[in-house]
Image (cartoon, rainbow, N blue to C red):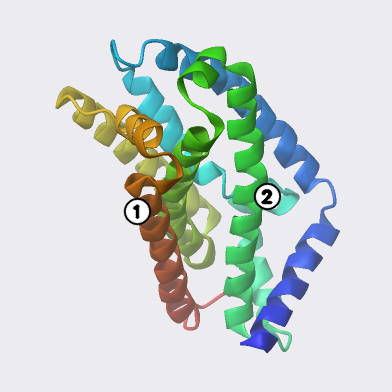
């Protein structure tokens, strides 16, 4: 296991060294996303006990898995060039265990979630006066971590598609997820349920001991790890030619 972690760290370092600006571009993009989302989020917090905007649920569910990505040149080339498939082909040609590749992918996701969450949720909290008036910092951290847990849950399928699908199939599956997400949000709101209200109220009431937050993190991270293990097993027999 120690050797796997060592190799995984080498892969992560290589990824960052090959695209030194990816963290900068990612931070700028997430700052923009947080700035854009802050206005509608701030408005929703102002009227939280009066009405619920279903678009809030859609934005947060849509953005949650994006927090797990670093926007590198390879990710932008994926649709046209199947850059992840080429990467897997390269790693198969050198003495690096396949398990290290998947551990490095999880490491990359966790690093991305740490950086992106600070930028995205941090900008919203800094700009949103009504957010700060409604939630203290511990409650807002619980609110953010709950959405990160949802992001973990959705990241699992993306890891599978990266390793098992072509760029076009990946794009198609992403569109399917967006349609299903939109449909689920609309359905829940028609039934009178708001994911935003549920998570926000739990965070305000329980703060960092929120069972919703801990449940989201445990289920989300567990699902991501299980999907990674499943992908690892399936990927061993994938024909990369």
Q: Residue at x 79, y 41 (%)?
A: 24
Nearer-N-terminus badge (1/2)? 2
Quadrant where the N terminus sits is: bottom right
- Please state the horizontal and vertical placement of residue 129, each as a whole percent of the image: 57, 13
Disc 1/disc 2 C-alpha distance (Å): 35 Å
Rendering coords of residue 46 (x, y %): 43, 11
Which residue position is annotated with label 2? 77
In the rendered structure, the answer to whether residue 115 lies left or right of residue 53 reads right
The residue lying at 40 percent from left, 47 percent from top is 209
Placement of the C terminus among the 4 image quadrants? bottom right
Give the side of residue 1 with respect to residue 15, left or right: left
Residue tagged 1? 215
| Above or below, 190 relative to 69 | above
Residue 195 occupies which quadrant of the picture? top left
Q: Secondary structure at mark 1?
A: helix
In the image, residue 78 sits, relative to residue 54, either above or below, namely: below
Q: Report the number of numbered marks.
A: 2
Residue 80 visible to an observer of this rendering: no
Foreground: 209 or 46?
Answer: 209
Q: Residues within 10 Å of mark 1 (few under 14, many from 20)?
A: some
Nearer the observer, 155 or 53: 53
What residue is drawn where x is 41% and y is 67%? Answer: 227
In the image, 67 versus 211, the foreground residue is: 211
Q: Position of residue 105 (x, y in %)?
A: 60, 65
Residue extending farthest left: 191
Secondary structure under tag 2 reads helix
The answer to whether residue 161 is seen in the rendering is yes
């Amino acid at each position: 296991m120690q050797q796997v972690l060592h190799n995984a760290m080498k892969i992560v370092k290589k990824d960052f060294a090959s695209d030194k600006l990816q963290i900068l571009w990612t931070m700028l993009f997430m700052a923009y996303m947080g700035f854009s989302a802050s206005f509608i989020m701030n408005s929703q917090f102002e009227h939280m006990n009066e009405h619920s905007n279903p678009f809030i649920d859609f934005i947060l569910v849509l953005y949650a898995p994006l927090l797990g990505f670093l926007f590198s040149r390879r990710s932008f080339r994926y649709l046209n060039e199947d850059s992840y498939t080429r990467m897997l082909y390269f790693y198969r040609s050198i003495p690096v265990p396949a398990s290290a590749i998947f551990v490095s992918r999880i490491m990359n996701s966790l690093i991305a979630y740490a950086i992106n969450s600070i930028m995205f949720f941090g900008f919203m909290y800094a700009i949103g006066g009504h957010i700060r008036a409604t939630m203290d910092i511990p409650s807002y951290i619980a609110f953010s971590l709950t959405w990160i847990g949802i992001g973990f849950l959705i990241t699992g399928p993306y890891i599978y598609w990266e390793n098992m699908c072509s760029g076009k199939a990946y794009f198609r599956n992403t569109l399917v997820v967006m349609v299903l997400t939109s449909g689920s949000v609309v359905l829940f709101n028609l039934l009178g349920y708001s994911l935003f209200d549920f998570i926000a109220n739990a965070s305000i009431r329980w703060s960092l001991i929120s069972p919703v937050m801990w449940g989201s993190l445990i289920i989300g991270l567990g699902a991501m790890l299980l999907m990674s293990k499943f992908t690892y097993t399936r990927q061993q027999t994938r024909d990369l030619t």
